[in-house]
Every structure is written in C-alpha cells, then in structure tokens.
Amino acid sequence: MEPLLELRAVSKSFDAVRALKNVSIALRPGEIHALAGENGAGKSTVVRIIGGEHQPDTGTVVLDGEPIRFGGPREARRHGVAVIHQEPSRFPDLDVAENVFMGRQPLRKGRRIDRAAMRGQAAEIFEQLGVPLDPDRPTRGLSIADQQVIEIAKALSGSARVIVMDEPTAALSTVEAERLFRVARRLAEGGAALLFVSHRLEEMYALCHRVTVLRDGELVTTMPMAEIDRDTLVRRMVGRSVEQLFPGRQDRPGDDVLVVSGLSRAGVFSDVSLTVRRGEIVGLAGLVGSGRSEAARAIFGVDRRDSGTVVVNGRALPAGDPRAAIEAGLAMVPEDRREQGLIPDLSIERNASLAMLGAVSSGGIVRRSAERALAGRWAERLGLKFGRLSDPVATLSGGNQQKVVLGKWLAGEPVALIVDEPTRGIDIGAKFEVHKLLADLARDGIGILMISSDLPEVLGMADRVLVMHEGRITASLTRPTEEEVMRAATGSVS
C-alpha cells in the first residue's frame, strides 16, 4: 500500500547540532507506526517536520506521492496532517465544541457562528470515536484523557488523514490509555495513518504495526513490531539489553530507617504498615487508584492521616508536618516532578538548593556563590547534562529534571527516600541512569521506598515488593513474578 506521507532522506541541523541525518519514514493508511529512541535521538524533530513547524535542510516530505513543503503548522493542517502533543492546548472557559472548532467554526449568514451545527458536528465526531463526551460541557476540569480526545476531534474536524500522537499517554492512567488506544485503532481502521511516539515499550507492542528506531539523529531500523522482540528493540535504541537497565545489587540491608504502622485515612487507604531498612529498595506496586501515592504523601506529611504512626531513624513524626519529616532524615521525590518537584522558570541551581536554603543563606539572604557550589557538586555527582547552572530547569530533558529533583533532596543527606514514579515520562537511556543512581544510593546506605506503575522496573529494582489493592497492602513478596504481583494488585490472592 502506498504511503500517505513520507520523509525521504531528511536531514536537519540547528547551528552546529545535527538533529537528523538522512532519515526516511513512510506512514501508510490503516497503520499505526511507532517512533522509538532516547531523548536526543531526533524524534521531536521528526514530529515537527511532519507537522510543519520545521522544514528539512535536505531531503523531501512527500504527501500522496507528491513532494510538498509545509509553510507552517496551519498549512500542514490544511493538507490533513495533525499533531497531537503530550500537553493538550485548550481554552478552559469555552465548551468542548468551541474548543474542537476553534478558528474553524461553521458560519451562518452574516458570518455568525452556527452553534447548533458546531455542536452537532462535534457530537458526530465523538460518536465516531466511541467516546461519550458532551459538546456543551466546559473544558475546565476535564481529565487529560478527555483533553486528548478533544485534540483528536480537532484533527478529525479538519479532515486529518495523517495523525501524530506525541507521548499522548504520559499523564494517563491505564484505563484512560486503553480508551485512547481504542480511539487510535478506530482511526486506523478508518484509513488514517498514525505515528505514535512513546517511551513505553509495552504500549508500542499493544498498539503499533511497525516501528522506526532512531539513535543520535540517524535511522537504525524500521520493521514490523511482530518481528522484533523487546530486548532487541532496547539494544537498538540505547545499545544495551533489557537486563542491563537494572543494575545488579548484592548488598545486605541494615537496620530499620522507616517504620510505618497502621496508617489510615478514611476512604483512601487503611491499616498500611511497612518497613524499609538501611540500604534496601522496597517496591510499592499496585494499579492506579490503589492508594500508593496517597499513602506515601501521608507518610511524608504532605497529606493528613487519621491514625497510625511513622518513625524515621527512631524518631516518631507528627502527622501532617513535612518539615519534621525532613529534619528527621526523610525525603520525597513526588510523582509529578513538573508540578510538585520543580519550579520550571527558576534556574537549575535555584531548584537544586530549594530544600537547603538555610545552608546557602546568610542573614536570610541567599548567597549565590554557595547556591552555585551546592548545585555544582550535585550536578557532577549525578552526571547532570546541562548548558549553564543559571539556565531555567525547564530547558533540561525529563531525565535530567528528575536528577535535579533527586539532587535537591539528597543534598540534605536523608536516611530514607520515597520516590514516586521515578522514571515516568523519561526515555530508556535516562531510565538506566536513574536506576543506577537509586542502586548507588541504596549501596550508600539510604533506605528507599519506590512507587512505580512500571512492573518490570519494580521487579528489576526492588529487594522486596509490597502490593496495594483498594487502599490496603495485600502482599509482601520477595523476588516475585509479574503474575504474582498482578494477582495481589487485583485482589485475587487468598
């Protein structure tokens, strides 16, 4: 079948940086094509060239068999090419239908907006997608999953035939992601060509027909998903096998550094008890909504608890007091690093010192030299890749942002560390670096409670695995199988 859209031997440079070199990709109707690679591999540049944001330096974009040069995203959309980004754009004070047709509203005589036609067409699109979304509902307060569906509806309202989904599931639950997959399959069945960009290998295998792998801006391979196993795919992405993503550890845990007993909060979690020892990584697994993150936030004191005790290094913590937790030697890397772990517009050095302002201040005034020295030490220790420490932290890749959050807390020399989804939204290579860092911290004697929805990560990193289901710990397992964890996570254990 002839491709709807192709990149043929496309190269692109930004100043002295070669982002793409002779990359070719063909997107065929009825097919979902995965684009895989580390951060910096060239995926974003491919997406922007397809979407009309960038033009190639050399090579050709071909649409319907004819060379074309998009003058910008608007022209690409006019030709039926749409890009759905990880962070949906929306007008929160307008309703769903108005967001779907923004800038392309159907008009009545006198060039007045035909609201009835707009709502009717939006309803038809949502019915076509199999999603019961009310066109009259305000978009403010909608879930990320519903916002993604609105982005897809925008594409379809503009008669898009080539649809790029750039990390669409990064902020979605498993249930929400599966709904998005159903929509994507329905689009492909209708003859659209989809390019699916994701760091999650399991999603590629569940959804995609073919995969193109990029490394350092060059094409490594394009082949059917059914013909490439997971280990081979990882090796072609990063040059190392799946097993090497999880550093081996032989250390024996020491004394208890975190002891939680009978922790409860009405309607959220109940009777949560766990122990983390010095030098030990304890995995906390469970399905989304099982209460893992909520329990962790209550342990750290961010959220209240109704009953139960938390003891850090022999010191009992008062409820709802993160400062006391920090002073006792407990640190926490939150699930959402952008919203809860970093201030994106502040510099790398300022973010790195936020938890240690007392150590870099004199008379209530932050000493810039001390702040920079602190950030520099941790940047070197964590292998941070950056331009200048004075650059905004938002300029860093996801993996390097995660290192800044870790460095911010490690500067206080904690005895116990809670990490919630430590590798969410970062690429395979950065995952390896974060895994190695966590293993090194455990080797240095820090006790780590690691919450993760990535089951291979839990099995590969944890010395013990605790599993939560509906707010309760249902199993404590040593070196379990995936099946054992999933049985406990779904409440299927006796």
Image (tube, rainbow, N blue to C red):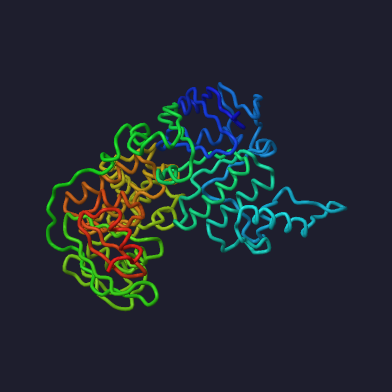
Name the image quarter holding residue 130. bottom right
- Percent x, y for residue 158? 69, 44
The C terminus sits in image quarter: bottom left
State whether residue 48 is above or below residue 327. above
Residue at left offset 64%, top offset 46% = 155
State left or right for residue 247 relative to residue 59: left
Name the image quarter holding residue 304. bottom left
- Percent x, y for residue 129? 61, 53
Q: Is residue 313 visible?
A: yes
Residue at left offset 48%, top offset 41% = 208
| Direction right: furthest residue | 109
- Percent x, y for residue 101? 70, 51
User: Which is more toward the observer, 235 or 308?
Assistant: 235
Name the image quarter holding residue 322. bottom left
Q: Is residue 356 visible?
A: no
State whether residue 296 is above or below residue 52. below
The N terminus sits in image quarter: top right
State whether residue 71 is above or below residue 116. above
- Percent x, y for residue 473? 29, 68
Residue at left offset 63%, top offset 38% = 81
User: Which is more toward the observer, 478 or 250?
Assistant: 478
State left or right for residue 451 relative to residue 178: left
